[in-house]
Amino acid sequence: MTAPTQVEGAPLPMNLREPRSGQKKGPSMSSEHASAPLSAPANRPIVSVRVSEPAVVHPIGAGTILITDDEPGIRASLCLFLGRLGYTVIEAADADTAVELLGRQRFDLVLSDIALPGTRTGLDLLAQVKQQQPDVDVILMTGHMDVDFAINAIKRGATDYFKKPFLFDELKHAVQRCIERRRLLEKARDLERLQSRHDALKGVQREFMVSLAAMIDAKSPYTRAHSERVSAYARHFGTVLGISDRELKIVTTGGRLHDIGKLGTPDSVINKPGRLDAAEWEIVKQHPICGAQLLEPIAMMRPYVPIVRSHHENFDGSGYPDRLKGDQIPLTVQIVKIADYYDAITSDRPYREPMTLREACDTLTSEIGKGFSDPLVTAFVAMLQSAPWASKGAVGDVQL
Ligand SMILES: [Fe+2]
Ligand SMILES: [Fe+2]
């Protein structure tokens, strides 16, 4: 294998339009400049050339380019030119060497001649690059280009092609476009990775909170799966009302979280077999505030805070903790509140039987103007009367 050569900080080579007579590949790039001694004129930067293994450090960070051409002079010219532009350049004399290098390190761009010694051509190398590092652009160079060649190269995935001889300025712009595209692609991928990690974290946080809320329900046989049912009723009612997808998500998750503040309510109060006394009621009435305080510091849980804090507010302003009234109570909160209320009156309690569908509808209707607005109750009762699961009477095992 040819030892890769890395060139940095070379002076600009001359225009390579003038082919040298008797060159192997017809009107190809001149290598005379690159073949010249690499001592720099007094007013030019010092050129350094070193042969090294391709464990490349990116000295300037502009990008790493693999050049494949069997003519040492052309490789050297390109190394000088691209090195002068700040790129790290690795060279290979044939496709096999290039493929080996591709397996060992990451490149930002491959610049390859078509006619290469050995069994593989530049088009074979192009195919290999697209297989090994699909995001890497490939620019092909040839001394004999026709329309068919150009179409074939592009069809196979080449980003650009040049007929020798060409102006280095043209090559420079093509290289810059490829590297820039590569950088933008990498940034987009980084953002995508960050976003997916962020989404995963959000999912974990939400599931954690939902699990906490379910633990509270499980504390008492009378509230088991209460939040799950409230969530299902709220989602069903929200769908009937035609709320947006975002609102639907908020009422669904909000329904599961609405009583999360009961984490701060003593078990003796939650599990009390009889009716609560005034002091115990005051303790229970703290759970919306407690829940909101729990969720507020977590940015992704904030959309659910209104439901958690205000699901005991009443339409007439007699609720708690903020005595909101009418339109001050967001629709998503009203949806979860009526679902919560319905589940409470149709669930078993140690001191009463669960209400039947008819009794529940009558009770809800009696709350018009008090706990709920007229349109909300009317729509909810209509939904119950047309829902097969509601007509069963017992809703404890309902599957919405
Ligand atoms: Fe509650
Ligand atoms: Fe509840």
Image: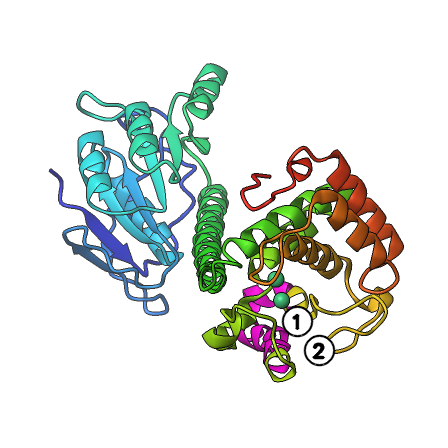
For mark 1, give the secondary structure. Answer: helix
The image position of residue 253, as x and y in percent, is 58, 55
Q: Which residues are magenta?
A: 282-305
Q: Tell me if label 2 and label 1 are in contact, CB under 8 Å.
A: yes
First-in-chain label (2 vs 1): 1
- Residue 75: in sight, yes or no? yes
For mark 2, give the secondary structure. Answer: loop
- Residue 33: in sight, yes or no? no
Kindly identify which residue carries mark 2.
321
> Could you tell whether 301 is left or right of 211 in the image?
right
Q: Which one is closest to the eye, mark 2 or mark 1?
A: 2
Does residue 92 belong to the magenta stretch?
A: no
Closer to the camera in the image, 83 or 157? 157
Q: Residue at x 56, y 55 (%)?
A: 226
Does residue 298 belong to the magenta stretch?
A: yes
> Could you tell whether 159 is left or right of 108 in the image?
right
Kindly identify which residue carries mark 1.
309
Q: How would you classify the magenta stretch by its main secondary structure?
A: helix
Would you say the beta carbon of the disc 1 residue lies within 8 angstroms of ligand 1?
no
The numbered mark at residue 242 is none
Asked where in the image residue 374 lies, by quadrant, the reply is: bottom right
Q: Residue at x 60, y 44 (%)?
A: 395
State the CA–CA distance, disc 2 to disc 1: 8 Å
Q: Would you call the spot at circle 2 few (<14 residues within 10 Å), some (14-19), or many (20 or more)?
A: some
Q: Among all residues in the image, which is located at the extreme left? A: 1
> Could you tell whether 162 is left or right of 313 in the image?
left
